[in-house]
Image (tube, rainbow, N blue to C red):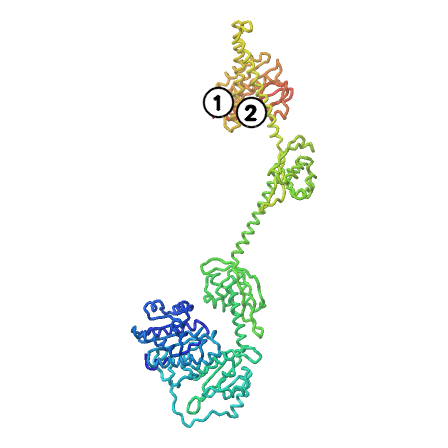
Amino acid sequence: MGEDSRSLYACLIYRQDCERNREVSRYLAAGLDVKEQVVVVISGPLQKSFCAALQSQGLKTSEAEQSGHLLFASPEGLGLVTASSVADAVNCLAAVGRKAMAQGFRGVRIYWEMSGAMLEKDLAWLQECLAGCDRLAATTDISLLCGYDRQQVPGSLLIEVLGLYPLLIHRGKRIANSHYLLSDAKSAPSSGSFFRAPDENTGSHREKRNKRPYRRGQVLDAIFSAAPIGLWVLNKEQRMVFTNQNFCLATGVSEEQFLQAPHYSMVMSADEAVECMLSDAEAFRADGPVESEELISSVDGDQHIFRIVKTKVVNEEQDVEGLLGLAIDITEQKEAERRLRHSEARFRDIALSIGDFIWELDADGRFIYCSDKVEEMLGFAAPELLGKCFFDVITGRKAKDLERLICDSETPKEAFRNLQGWALDKEGQWHFLRISGVPIFTEEGICQGFRGVTEDVTRQKQAESGVKRALIQAEQARDQIDSIIKSTADGFIVTDPRNHHIELINDSAREFLQGGPQSLVGQPVAYVVEDEGLLRQVQEIYSEHAPPLLQTDIRLSKSTAAKGRIVQARTSLMRNKQGRVNGALTVLRDVTRERELDRMKAEFMSMAAHELRTPLTAILGYSELCLNPEEFGGFNGAQQKEFIAEINDKAEVLAKLVNDLLDISRLEAGKPLPLNIEKVAIEPMLTKLVKRYRLLAPKHLFEVDLSGDLPEFVPADGERLEQVLENLFSNAVKYSLEGSLIRVGGERVNGYCQISVIDQGIGMTSEQEDRVFDKYYRADCSDTAARGIGLGMSIAREIVEQHGGAIWLESATGVGTRVTFTVPLKR
């Protein structure tokens, strides 16, 4: 360390921790650079956070601690707080220096945070301690920097402390302390040597001759009195020698008090005095004016912000005679600046927080300002758009509209809102923009541009298009549903849950219930429904324990058209998306045919059982006669042969009935009847059947009428074709009177072999004729009707159609019936 730096000890005054951290890290780094040991004396609980703060300033604290170059110690640990005397306290610091020198360090550099117990020490004790440190530095290489936090240290204490240090560090500046009282100013080192900069001449006092004492004159008094700002003058001993009325009003201290006080700090508030003293010290050492801003409380308690300007007053020999100070009240200016900053911050926050980008155009429509949001919206950085025309960004007709609004001299300059148009972003993607703006006028009423906002509404546009499409689709779906509801054969009735009034009814339901052409919507359901069961069902569906579906059959007899019809009514609840009941739906379906089929099936089962039992009874009876002839007196051979023939006939009837049941079962399962197609001689088959039925029904007359072009062979399943003819002959015999003629005809017609069986029987009605081919249908179900189970004609149609032919019937009541079928000659 240089000779001037041995007596180096300084005072750091700070308001923010970041200011302290910056200065202390510079101070310690300077020591580490010259191989000195650096010691931080700070309260134990604060050491960890302070170490981290120094590290954030670039100081390698971890490496320095590990190598022993950096030590953290508390005032209590070093014995500074518990020392019984000033000498003991100084010896504690001396011991740190001796230990460092013994370890080979070139010196010790100490930072001492003045807080806690140290601030409770007597000022005289602290003054002696620092004087001892000065003497210690003269013989050892020890440097000392003491830190004071303006937020914690009272202003009154700082006033006294300022006189104890030869060097001050304040607001990043290092200045010789003009308030230093312990030694002559020539012993105060310069700021440069404190931070290891090259030594500077601190400007030792020169012998001055022919000095003229500071004098006030009439001109100066007049200037001071008339000045609209606060003015004051300090002599070189820093005693107030002049102040004007404005400064007195600003500080709340009279001129007499200022001039009589040995130092202005004795009559001003301590905090304000400290600020003045610090700036005084800087001004006495500065080469020119020193400016600062200080907060000064007035007599009424209001605080005002002053711009303080201080400059040295020199005599003709350029010797410093004192300081001239100016205090300019800038409270209103600061408030205006604060409001402006607040307004700018608010504008900036709004501009950044909203999704729109804010812009300003000149009179030619060129961007002179764009917020950064434009980059998110269109991909262009704000500077890229400056100087470009807005209507070059927008495309199509809307660009012309925008240009006319902004640039056309004949168009009134008015605010516009929600001008919409498409724009291409930097990547070539389309965006739909919504633009609003207001004109900017000078005081003379001349429009100098527009400012406004632009919003990207592409998603809304797409959503609107989607909504429109959805609405169109919904309307189409509604129309489709309406069409379905109107055109369906089932009736629909929707009733409300409160009063059971009709909310919807379609045409089919009107037809079923004969509601008439008048509107039934809004009417009670009882208005159109007379069936008590259905009315009860519509009401009971809302009960708590009702099943999800109620149904009943009602017989319509209100009109001739609906007379005898059976309608099934199925009622269920309707629920919305939230699961709440919002009505009941009743579906009416004509089940007349289904119920008739059910009846026919029931009759079929009864008839089938009867038809099966009759031949079985005969078979059992004759077989018993054959098995036990002795019980009946015995039978000759002819009788036994007759019994066996009867058994055989009944077995054939039973086999035919079983085959019909098997065939209808196969058809019910959706399976086709098996066909074995071969060449079938049609004429011999017809001749054989006629011959057989002449024996079975000798009281009927049979005639065969075959044309000359009847094909010799047809491709068919012979057994199935014979089954069809068997059924037709059987029906003709059953439903014809004895002695009537049954005629069989055959001919070739358009590539088909056409066979007809014509009887002169009882005939059929048109209704019977329409249903004769239905399964289980029997035209006459009375007890006196001919035997049969109602399957023959339906099976015959299936056989013919599977061959590729057709079968039809012509009949008249009391005249007879003609059944015709065709079989194709080629497969």
Within 10 Å of the Cα at label 2, are there few (<14), some (14-19), or many (20+) other Cα atoms?
Answer: some
> Which residue lies at the image location 58% right of the left edge and 68% below the top edge?
413
Q: Mark 1 or mark 2: which comes first in sequence?
A: 1
Q: Is residue 356 above or below residue 665?
A: below
Q: Is residue 497 left or right of residue 752?
A: right
Q: Residue furthest bottom?
A: 210
Residue ID for mark 1: 716
Q: Position of residue 692 (x, y in %)?
A: 54, 13
Q: Position of residue 713 (x, y in %)?
A: 48, 20
**Which amino acid, by three-letter code, is at mark 1?**
Ala
Q: Is residue 732 left or right of residue 45?
A: right
Q: Is residue 490 left or right of residue 156?
A: right
Q: Nearer the viewer, residue 336 or 106?
A: 106
Q: Position of residue 303 (x, y in %)?
A: 54, 77
Q: Position of residue 734 (x, y in %)?
A: 60, 17
Q: Which mark is residue 776?
A: none
Q: Nearer the viewer, residue 504 or 18?
A: 18
Secondary structure under tag 1 reads strand
Q: Nearer the viewer, residue 273 or 731?
A: 273
Res 677 seen here: yes
Q: Quadrant of residue 539?
A: top right
Within 10 Å of the Cα at label 1, are there few (<14), some (14-19), or many (20+) other Cα atoms?
Answer: many
Where the N terminus falls, by quadrant? bottom left
* Contact, mark 1 vs mark 2 (Cβ under 8 Å): no
Residue ID for mark 2: 794
Closer to the observer: label 1 or label 2? 2
**Which amino acid, by three-letter code, is at mark 2?**
Ser
Res 709 seen here: no
Q: Is residue 220 above or below residue 302?
A: below
